[in-house]
């Protein structure tokens, strides 16, 4: 049985979103060291504010300022902070009900240790030195034994309000391709392409999935396919990717390898982009030390008849 592979992977992208009037006021307020909540029809003050009452679903826009001091309602100790978290040293995640609010907000509490944290303790906001209109304008909470803060009654109207934010999403994980795809990857290192045949419908899956998605049965019979194949469909790429040293325009295509029951995708090279066509016969081009083909190029054969690949579009 082949060794099952695994590798660390990171999925990361910036997510840009616009803000409605309530969230705009809340984040702009943080920039100005003002905490705003929203008052519901029955008199509750929600912090952080939302645009619709979670109980009645009514639209709510009645902004009200609350204090920068509050009470811990529950907490959990974070022994090992991760990249991007509010503090670089161990801290407590806390739910804090700010004075004047009826709900609690989640943030970090800078404390010396778990023994210094308790439900009911009083805290206050520690503001970030540089504020831009984001939740990170609250650097963290800190213990506080003074008088409750006094809200200034801010209306929620600000010059130059924040109208949009960019949230950077990142997921770090370890990926294992499993038995079937591990065998596929290891075969590629020998410049061979191996799929698996469904024992029921007889379709050969490349890359293999370990099971037939149509019949729902396991696939274990290995079948070597290719190396040549047929372009079934394609697209012309006109936008240069930041992490690919490939000049645009170039062609990305679905290629049905000879003997495969479905098409895989790969780049087409060795031919002007405007000469790539459906039915073009292609072969893989390997680079030194590569574990997969760098691209496919014309094989010098007559184009395949449409009927031979129409079921693989």
Image: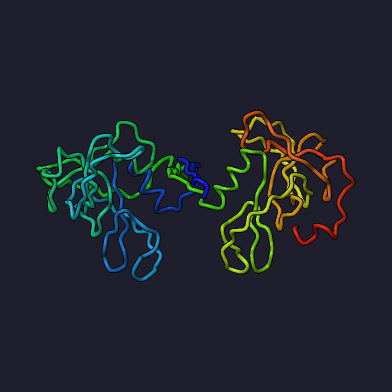
**Residue that appears at 43% across and 40% down:** 160
Q: Left of 229 or right of it: where is 171?
A: left
Q: Position of residue 279 (x, y in %)?
A: 83, 50
Q: Left of 42 or right of it: where is 117?
A: left
State the residue lying farthest toward the right: 302
Q: Position of residue 152 (x, y in %)?
A: 24, 46
Of residues 35 and 73, the one nearer the viewer is: 73
Q: In this figure, what is the number of numbered marks? A: 0
**Residue that appears at 75% across and 41% down:** 251
State the residue lying farthest toward the front: 1
**Residue that appears at 74% across and 49% down:** 255
Q: Position of residue 61 (x, y in %)?
A: 38, 59
Q: Left of 251 or right of it: where is 128?
A: left
Of residues 25 and 254, the one nearer the viewer is: 254
**Residue that appears at 37% across and 45% down:** 27
State the residue lying farthest toward the bottom: 56
In the rendered image, which quarter is residue 250 located in? Answer: top right
Of residues 292 and 150, the one nearer the viewer is: 292
Quarter that holds the C terminus: bottom right
Image height of 171 relative to 47, above or below: above
Q: Position of residue 98 (x, y in %)?
A: 21, 51
Query: How is the structure coloured here?
Result: rainbow
Q: Left of 165 or right of it: where is 202?
A: right
């Amino acid at each position: 049985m082949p060794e099952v592979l695994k590798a660390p992977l990171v999925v990361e992208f910036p997510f840009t979103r616009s803000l409605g009037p309530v969230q705009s006021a809340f984040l702009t307020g943080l920039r100005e060291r003002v905490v705003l909540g929203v008052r519901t029809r029955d008199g509750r003050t929600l912090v952080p504010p939302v645009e619709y009452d979670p109980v009645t679903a009514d639209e709510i826009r009645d902004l009200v300022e609350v204090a920068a001091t509050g009470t811990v309602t529950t907490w959990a100790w974070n022994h090992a902070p991760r990249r991007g978290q509010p503090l670089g040293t161990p801290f407590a995640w806390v739910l804090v009900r700010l004075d004047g609010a009826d709900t609690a907000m989640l943030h970090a509490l800078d404390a010396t240790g778990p023994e210094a944290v308790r439900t009911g303790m009083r805290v206050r906001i520690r503001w970030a030195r540089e504020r831009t209109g984001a939740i990170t304008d609250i650097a963290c909470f800190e213990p506080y034994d003074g008088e409750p803060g006094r809200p200034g009654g801010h209306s929620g109207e600000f010059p130059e309000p924040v109208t949009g934010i960019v949230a950077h999403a990142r997921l770090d994980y370890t990926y294992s391709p499993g038995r079937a795809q591990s065998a596929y990857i290891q075969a590629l290192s020998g410049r061979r392409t191996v799929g698996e045949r469904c024992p029921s419908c007889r379709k050969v899956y490349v890359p293999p999935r370990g099971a037939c998605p149509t019949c729902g049965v396991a696939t274990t019979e290995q079948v070597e396919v290719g190396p040549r194949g047929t372009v079934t469909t394609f697209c012309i790429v006109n936008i240069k990717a930041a992490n690919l040293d490939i000049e645009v325009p170039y062609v990305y295509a679905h290629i049905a390898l000879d003997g495969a029951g479905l098409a895989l995708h790969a780049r087409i090279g060795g031919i002007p982009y405007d000469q790539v066509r459906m039915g073009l016969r292609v072969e893989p081009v390997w680079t030194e030390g590569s574990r997969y083909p760098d691209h496919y190029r014309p094989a010098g054969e007559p184009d395949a008849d449409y009927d031979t690949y129409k079921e693989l579009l």
